[in-house]
């Protein structure tokens, strides 16, 4: 039911996918999404992780680039290969571009205040906003206070415009993983209510499930495909 | 007259936690870190008043005031390094008395330090096994871990199967 949507494993992190899966299962998650950075591959030990029962493991892709043009190109190239696509927005033009693209599932915002047009396009394109708790764990003092202020603002904007949230601890080691209840308690400090936090923890699972089904167009699902439908209906 | 009326006594909650860390830590380190991370997050006026009651090297109990347990849970979740070792505090449960906290949430199991210094040689990873816990294995790598702040690599028995010469299906799975 609860998912950790942004897990970095070897070689980008210091734990293997199976260790992440075992610890996440112990903490009460029902699934994790392991991120492949820009679809470069090179993730080790995925076979071992798939053998672990009681937790589902999905491979997503985290896209980042220097300018919006190449970001768009990368999204086009990678969207169909992965069931989950996140964008790490390291500057404001990337953030704007990512929130304006309906193919993006999740935007990880590294420290910008959401503007009204950005919030509108996020709502229109159903892009979720990641609340990354890693700075709350790592920072202390004035820098954390500034970060808390920014996140509280973004949470308020998200609530006003109806943008969906996802909560992540962005673990790069199994020691960075936090249990869902701990994440709810931390999100409470950012002004996220218990119900909103529960929705945010469930959302990655729902999006994965939707993306794994096949859609002909928005709202039209392909349930069964018949290659020879013309012949059966006597057309040709 | 009694100096303190029983009805005026603060009600307390006892939070049982499990420590995961890369090195050996004592109760003093844990106590200092819990105090400092709570104070850093909630300041002097925070009402939980956390105190470390006991710590046995792996499981511990923290006391806080009733009604502030969620605050303490958030503060414990922000702990990432204790006395220079990467660590994480996992809350196992909250209870109203020390007795039920101990009985309900502290299980009898242990982490095994690795004595034989078995080696792991996988594609891209080589090192020495430091400790095991169930199927989980910590490996001290031969090279330096670039750009990361952990000392050990977190692997599992599932990663080693077929890749380690010593994968013999023993009780700890290595």
Image (tube, grey):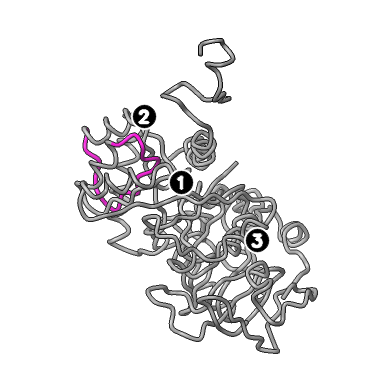
Q: Nearer the viewer, mark 2 or mark 1?
A: 1
Q: Are marks 2 and 1 on the same chain?
A: yes
**Residue at mark 3: chain:** B
**Label 3: element kind:** strand
- Could you tell me which residue is drawn at 39 percent across and 52 percent down? A62
Q: Position of residue B131 (x, y in %)?
A: 65, 79
Image check: B37 left or right of A94? right
Tell me the CA gap for discs 3 and 2. 37 Å
**Residue beneath label 3, please?**
B16
Residue in the picture at 71% in, 56% down: B97
Q: Residues at badges 3 and 2 in contact (C-beta under 8 Å)?
A: no
> How far is mark 2 from mark 1, CA to CA?
26 Å
| Disc nearest the viewer among 3 and 1 | 1
Real-space Cα distance between discs 3 and 1?
Answer: 40 Å
Between label 3 and label 2, give the one nearer the viewer: 2
The residue at 63%/62% (across/down) is A48
In terms of secondary structure, what is the magenta stretch mainly?
loop
Do the residues at pointers 3 and 1 share their chain? no
* Residue B73 shown left or right of residue A38 in the figure: right
Picture quadrant of residue A47: bottom right
Q: Which mark is residue A162?
A: 2
Q: Is residue A60 left or right of residue B53?
A: left
Q: Which residues are magenta?
A: A101-116
Residue furthest bottom as drawn: B116
Sequence order check, earlier mark of 2 and 1: 1
Query: Camera-side residue: A106 or A211?
Result: A211
| B141 lies above or below A169 | below
Residue A137 placed where, x, y %? 42, 61
Up the image or down, A196 lies above or below A48; here it is above
Where is mark 1, residue-wise?
A82
């Amino acid at each position: 039911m609860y998912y950790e949507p942004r897990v970095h494993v070897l070689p980008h992190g210091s734990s293997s996918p199976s260790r992440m899966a075992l610890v996440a299962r112990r903490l009460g998650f029902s699934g994790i999404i392991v991120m492949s950075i820009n679809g470069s591959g090179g993730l080790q030990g995925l076979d071992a992780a798939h053998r672990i029962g009681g937790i589902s493991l999905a491979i997503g892709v985290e896209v980042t680039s220097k300018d919006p043009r190449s970001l768009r190109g990368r999204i086009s190239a990678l969207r169909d290969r992965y069931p989950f696509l996140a964008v790490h927005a390291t500057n404001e033009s990337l953030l704007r571009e990512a929130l304006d693209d309906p193919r993006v599932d999740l935007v990880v915002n590294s420290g910008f205040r959401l503007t009204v047009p950005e919030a509108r396009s996020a709502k229109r394109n159903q892009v979720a906003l990641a609340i990354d708790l890693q700075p709350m764990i790592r920072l202390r003092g004035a820098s954390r206070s500034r970060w808390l202020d920014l996140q509280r603002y973004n949470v308020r904007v998200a609530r006003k415009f109806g943008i969906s949230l996802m909560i992540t601890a962005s673990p790069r080691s199994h020691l960075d993983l936090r249990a869902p209840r701990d994440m709810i308690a931390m999100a409470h400090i950012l002004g996220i209510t218990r119900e909103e936090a529960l929705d945010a923890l469930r959302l990655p699972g729902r999006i994965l499930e939707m993306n794994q089904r096949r859609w002909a167009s928005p709202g039209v699902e392909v349930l069964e495909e018949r290659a020879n439908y013309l012949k059966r209906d006597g057309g040709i | 007259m009694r100096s303190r009326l029983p009805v005026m006594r603060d009600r307390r909650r006892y939070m049982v936690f499990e420590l995961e860390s890369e090195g050996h830590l004592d109760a003093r380190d844990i106590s200092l870190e819990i105090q400092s991370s709570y104070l850093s997050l909630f300041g002097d006026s925070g009402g939980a008043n956390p105190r470390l009651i006991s710590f046995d090297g792996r499981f511990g109990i923290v006391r806080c005031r009733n009604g502030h347990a969620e605050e303490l849970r958030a503060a414990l979740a922000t702990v990432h390094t204790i006395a220079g070792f990467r660590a994480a505090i996992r809350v196992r449960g909250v209870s109203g008395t020390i007795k039920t906290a101990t009985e309900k949430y502290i299980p009898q199991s242990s982490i095994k330090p690795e004595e034989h210094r078995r080696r792991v040689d996988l594609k891209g990873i080589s090192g020495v096994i430091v400790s095991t816990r169930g199927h989980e294995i910590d490996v001290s790598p031969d090279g330096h871990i670039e750009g990361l702040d952990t000392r050990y690599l977190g692997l599992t028995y599932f990663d080693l199967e077929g890749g380690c010469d010593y994968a013999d299906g023993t009780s700890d799975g290595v």
